[in-house]
Image (cartoon, rainbow, N blue to C red):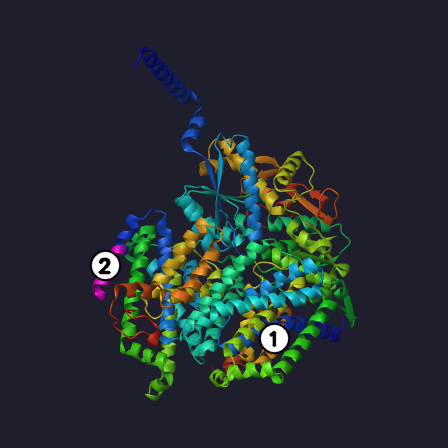
């Protein structure tokens, strides 16, 4: 077993983890950037994506189709939630209202999923095209994880370009910086907010569909994910898209390498990293001071 | 109706309560009061400083485990054990407070979360000491100094907890109505201006965090002595989330509101889970309903109905209904 | 009133008096226990289990087996003439909630028999309280070795196979296996630690090599690092002490790495729920089974047919089988004691030897651990069931698989 092959394998492990984390964290940071709300329901949205994806897969027999259907459905659910409930809270001074509402949603949605899909965990196989291993320097590495890395990178680039160049993307960035001005210029800011919330939820749902073949779809899969996503977003800087990429990669590397070398501290490593970052840069790596 | 009268009436009612309710309800009553105390401790941060903490479980867990660990090695009488546990919690809270208060807003919240999760992780790391995922079980409570042992029984313990709760409430009330509390109000409303007036706001924030941990630790120690065990769930972020919900639903910035929030949370959860398997669904819907229809919380609803005059400015400016007495 | 009506009234009244008299004398004449039954009502069994939350699937299995047992005992007229009543409570897997609900079961519902607790840490929290509650607690599925060792209390009994027993069974089997180097991966929960420690002791005792012990944090999701570690270790066999969500995640990901082709897995628990989800990825898995559904003895055949008749051909999982066994042992103790009083049950259960769905089980006196046979199974397709199941490949007598008294070790055996 050569050392170089091992390091490469671990890097690929970390990048594949980072990919799924990115989808979740990116959604969370976009939502925060636009709406300044911390979405506690994000983990359950991720779980909903996995379950909807499972059903889509069973009905159509295609993993790829579920990868498209689940984010659309979940995105619509998110938009409905924002439109009926969340938007009534804008303008309220206390942050507690958002916490309560999104926490409440998390609990309710969790139960709804249990009622619809039951307590039995659901297995989503990976499509045959993505089965198998690739031998990299003597080490077997799953094709599926390579797919995850590729998809994550492609999505990151696509969203980055979208935010930088496309008109809706520029609009989103403008609203996150100065919503009153944008509103004065005639744009329907409410629509932008609803769309971004839906988009953030859709991204989390993609993460869910991708994660399902790795962990199976089960109740409670979102519980720890939401905290991981928060940590990543804080490390990267709340509202910073680039920060969510860097945060995901950093956290994934710390988890992978840390779990290997410091098994006893596996639970603590991510938080130690966050502590370190916040002590050095209280706003996160690429964030602004709150 | 003035505050003093209200306090005495409530105290008397609570003192009589154990003789009115069925015996088996005493357990849940005690636990509800302990959680009420825990929620009130968080209110010092959330309601009076507008510092949202996502990691207040750390205070609870520290109090519980400190008591448990101390009692494993030294058979201290109950009051001494609890006091020592609170002291340990406060000591550990000082560096935590110092680091967390370097940031504000969400960063502050995440730092508190980090410490709570680190505490959780440490429980697994030092499992020989802390019992790992099992926690510490069979924790005793010994009769007090001079042979005082009325708190060994459930009824006696109820009065002990009641006393701690009321005592802590009086203490907290005195604090927030003192000049110290006035500075906190200044920090809450406009920190920059308060700094400009020459106050070292950081020191005030650190002190408040430590106080909040102290009262939270008291709740934790009381719990460990009552239940006889301490387990890692006490440190987990879900505990932090739940106590935050209790504060908000109860009515932040009122001290009494969070106590009511904590007590009602425990009772509601308990009663609902007896009746239906769908209880989390109903629970979550109730939270959301509070946000939409009763943003001032339980205490806000109660006081607006009785139209009590407010004695100190409400922490939340104009948005809260009048009558939220502190 | 006419003469006819008066006569009828007299006849009715006389008949009534006669009936009452007969009934009264029947009551007086009835054997003491029947009278007690009439007076005391049903036997209440408290089930503080997980209905919502992480282990809800195990809780749902506990509930379905209890309901099946109630149906079966009702048809037979109850136990000692009294019907069985199960009181279910939701603990969400949280020890604090479990203690609270159990306390209520005892104090409010006067329920002194407790079982069906899912998580070992919940069980550990209850043990010191049993004395105060005047209750007896029978574990149906808690694996942590410490419950009958350091944490032992007289009112606690364990009917099921514990984690050290599962590890021991596998180690005995591996003595003759071709694999020489092993690596172990376990959940960082109490039962996982217990399992790994026992396996290490046992595998070395049979002369094999354990190159490393891996502990994954509870609720861990990504096992890529650990899989890489296993690949790197050069081990030929991998002992897996993971359960539920963790096990499924591990096996799914390991299959994606093709790990099963390089390393043979040996698992401490074989769960039908996992086999169902993993499908063909679970074939060939070898493990210790806490309840082998294919065990061909009359008691198990009866249970299996009743279960499948009630639950539309569902295959009972290890929790179903162990819960059923625990209840059968409980009823045997109640019948022996002719009472449902906790201390009488404790007395009757000590030394009780029952043949249940897993064969002969001895509830030994010294630490209240049920001596269970050990079963090694291999997951394979079966023509008797719709899903693959664990086919028994080796059985070990109970004397060999149960640890020393009040311990998780097997010194000198």
Q: Which residues are magenta?
A: B1-13
User: Which residue is label 1 attached to?
Assistant: A248
Mark 2, secondary structure of its residue: helix
- Residue B137, visible in the rendered structure: no
**Residue A127 appears at what percent x and percent y?**
73, 63
Left or right? Give the position of C232 relative to C42: right
Give the percent coordinates (x, y) of residue C195: 61, 54
Q: Residues within 10 Å of mark 1 (few under 14, many from 20)?
A: many
The numbered mark 1 sits on a residue in which chain? A
| C354 lies left or right of C172 | left
Q: Between residues C70 and A80, which one lies in front from this camera angle?
A: A80
Of the numbered discs in the image, which one, if any, rests on residue A1? none
Q: Is residue B7 one of those drawn in magenta? A: yes
Residue shown at the point (77%, 61%) measured from the top left: C262
Tally of numbered tags: 2
In the picture, the disc for residue B9 is: 2
Compare residues B38 and C335 and report the one nearer the observer. B38
Secondary structure of the residue carrying numbered label 1: helix
Whether residue B238 is situated above or below residue C338 in the rendered picture: below
> Relative to B198, is B226 above or below?
above
Left or right of residue B191, residue C365 in this image: right
Q: Taking the image as drawn, is residue C35 in sight? A: yes
């Amino acid at each position: 077993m050569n050392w170089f092959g091992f390091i490469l394998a671990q890097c690929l492990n970390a990048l594949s983890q980072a990919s799924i984390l990115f989808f979740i964290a990116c959604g969370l940071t976009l939502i925060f950037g636009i709406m300044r709300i911390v979405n506690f329901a994000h983990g359950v949205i991720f779980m909903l994506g996995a379950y909807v994806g499972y059903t889509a897969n069973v009905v159509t027999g295609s993993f790829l189709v579920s990868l498209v259907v689940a984010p659309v459905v979940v995105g619509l659910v998110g938009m409905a939630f924002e439109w009926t409930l969340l938007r009534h809270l804008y303008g309220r001074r206390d942050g507690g209202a958002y916490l309560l509402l999104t926490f409440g949603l998390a609990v309710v949605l969790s139960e709804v999923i249990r009622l619809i899909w039951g307590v039995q965990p659901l297995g989503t196989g990976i499509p045959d095209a993505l089965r198998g291993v690739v031998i990299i320097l003597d080490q077997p590495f799953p094709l599926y994880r390579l797919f995850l890395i590729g998809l994550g990178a492609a999505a990151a680039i696509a969203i980055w370009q979208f935010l930088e160049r496309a008109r809706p993307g520029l609009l989103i960035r403008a609203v996150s910086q100065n919503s009153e001005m944008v509103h004065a210029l005639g744009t329907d800011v409410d629509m932008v907010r609803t769309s971004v919330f839906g988009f953030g939820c859709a991204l989390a749902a993609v993460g869910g569909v991708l994660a399902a073949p790795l962990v199976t779809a089960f109740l409670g899969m979102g519980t720890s994910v939401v905290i991981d996503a928060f940590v990543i977003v804080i490390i990267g800087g709340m509202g910073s898209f680039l920060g969510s990429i860097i945060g995901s990669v950093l956290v994934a590397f710390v988890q992978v390498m840390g779990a290997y070398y410091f098994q006893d501290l596996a639970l603590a490593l991510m938080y130690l990293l966050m502590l370190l970052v916040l002590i050095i840069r209280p706003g996160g790596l690429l964030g602004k001071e709150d | 109706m003035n505050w003093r009268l209200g306090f005495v009436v409530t105290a008397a009612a609570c003192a009589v309560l154990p003789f009115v309710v069925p015996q088996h309800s005493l357990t849940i009553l005690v636990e509800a009061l302990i959680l009420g105390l825990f929620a009130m401790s968080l209110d010092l941060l959330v309601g009076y400083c507008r510092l949202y903490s996502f990691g207040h479980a750390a205070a609870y867990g520290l109090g519980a485990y400190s008591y448990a660990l101390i009692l494993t090695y030294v058979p201290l009488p109950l009051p001494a054990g609890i006091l020592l546990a609170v002291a340990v919690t406060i000591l550990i809270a000082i560096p935590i407070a110092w680091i967390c208060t370097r940031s504000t807003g969400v960063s502050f919240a995440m730092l508190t979360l980090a410490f709570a999760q680190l505490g959780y992780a440490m429980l697994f790391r030092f499992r020989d000491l802390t019992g790992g995922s099992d926690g510490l079980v069979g924790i005793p409570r010994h009769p007090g100094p001079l042979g005082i042992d009325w708190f060994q029984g459930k009824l006696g313990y109820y009065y002990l907890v009641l006393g701690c709760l009321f005592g802590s409430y009086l203490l907290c009330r005195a604090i927030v109505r003192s000049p110290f509390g006035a500075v906190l109000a200044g920090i809450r409303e406009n920190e920059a201006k308060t700094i400009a007036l020459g106050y070292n706001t950081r020191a005030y924030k650190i002190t408040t965090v430590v106080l909040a941990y102290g009262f939270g630790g008291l709740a934790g120690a009381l719990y460990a002595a009552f239940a006889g065990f301490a387990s890692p769930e006490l440190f987990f972020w879900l505990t932090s989330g739940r106590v935050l919900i209790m504060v908000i639903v109860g009515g932040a910035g009122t001290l009494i509101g969070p106590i009511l929030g904590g007590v009602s949370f425990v009772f509601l959860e308990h009663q609902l889970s007896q009746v239906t398997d769908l209880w989390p669904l109903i629970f979550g819907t109730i939270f959301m309903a509070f946000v939409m229809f009763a943003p001032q919380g339980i205490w806000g609803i109660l006081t607006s109905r009785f139209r009590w005059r407010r004695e100190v400015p409400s922490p939340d400016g104009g948005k809260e209904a009048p009558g939220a007495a502190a | 009133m006419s003469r006819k009506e008066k006569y009828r009234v007299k006849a009715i009244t006389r008949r009534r008096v006669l009936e009452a008299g007969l009934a009264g004398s029947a009551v007086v004449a009835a054997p003491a226990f029947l009278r007690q039954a009439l007076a005391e009502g049903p036997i209440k069994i408290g089930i503080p289990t997980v209905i919502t939350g992480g282990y809800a699937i195990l809780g749902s299995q506990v509930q379905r087996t209890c309901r099946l047992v109630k149906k079966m005992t009702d048809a037979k007229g109850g136990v000692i003439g009294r019907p069985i009543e199960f009181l279910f409570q939701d603990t969400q897997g949280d020890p604090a909630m479990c203690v609270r609900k159990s306390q209520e079961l005892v104090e409010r519902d006067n329920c002194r028999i407790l079982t069906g607790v899912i998580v070992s840490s919940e069980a550990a929290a209850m043990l010191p309280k049993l004395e105060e509650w005047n209750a007896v607690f029978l574990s149906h599925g808690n694996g942590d070795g410490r419950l009958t060792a350091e944490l032992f209390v007289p009112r606690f009994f364990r009917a099921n196979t514990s984690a050290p027993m599962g590890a021991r069974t596998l180690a005995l089997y591996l003595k003759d296996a071709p694999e020489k180097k092993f690596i172990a991966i376990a959940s960082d929960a109490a039962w996982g630690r217990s399992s790994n420690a026992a396996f290490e002791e046992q595998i070395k005792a049979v002369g094999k090599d354990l190159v490393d012990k891996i502990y994954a944090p509870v609720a861990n999701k990504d096992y890529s690092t650990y899989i890489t570690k296993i690949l790197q270790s050069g081990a030929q066999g991998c002992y897996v002490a993971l359960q539920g969500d963790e096990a499924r995640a591990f096996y799914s990901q390991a299959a994606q790495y093709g790990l099963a082709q390089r390393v043979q897995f040996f698992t401490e628990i074989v769960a039908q729920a996992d086999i169902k989800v993993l499908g063909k990825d679970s074939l060939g898995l070898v493990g210790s089974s806490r309840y082998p559904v294919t065990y061909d003895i009359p008691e198990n055949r009866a249970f299996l047919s009743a279960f499948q008749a009630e639950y539309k051909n569902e295959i009972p999982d290890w929790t179903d089988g162990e819960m059923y066994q625990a209840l059968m042992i409980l009823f045997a103790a109640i019948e022996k004691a002719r009472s449902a009083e906790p201390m009488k049950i404790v007395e009757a259960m000590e030394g009780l030897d029952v043949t249940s769905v897993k064969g002969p089980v001895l509830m030994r006196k010294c630490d209240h651990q049920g001596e269970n046979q050990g079963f090694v199974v291999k997951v394979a397709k079966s023509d008797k069931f719709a899903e693959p199941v664990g086919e028994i490949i080796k059985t070990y007598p109970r004397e060999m698989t149960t640890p020393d008294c009040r311990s998780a070790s097997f010194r000198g055996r």
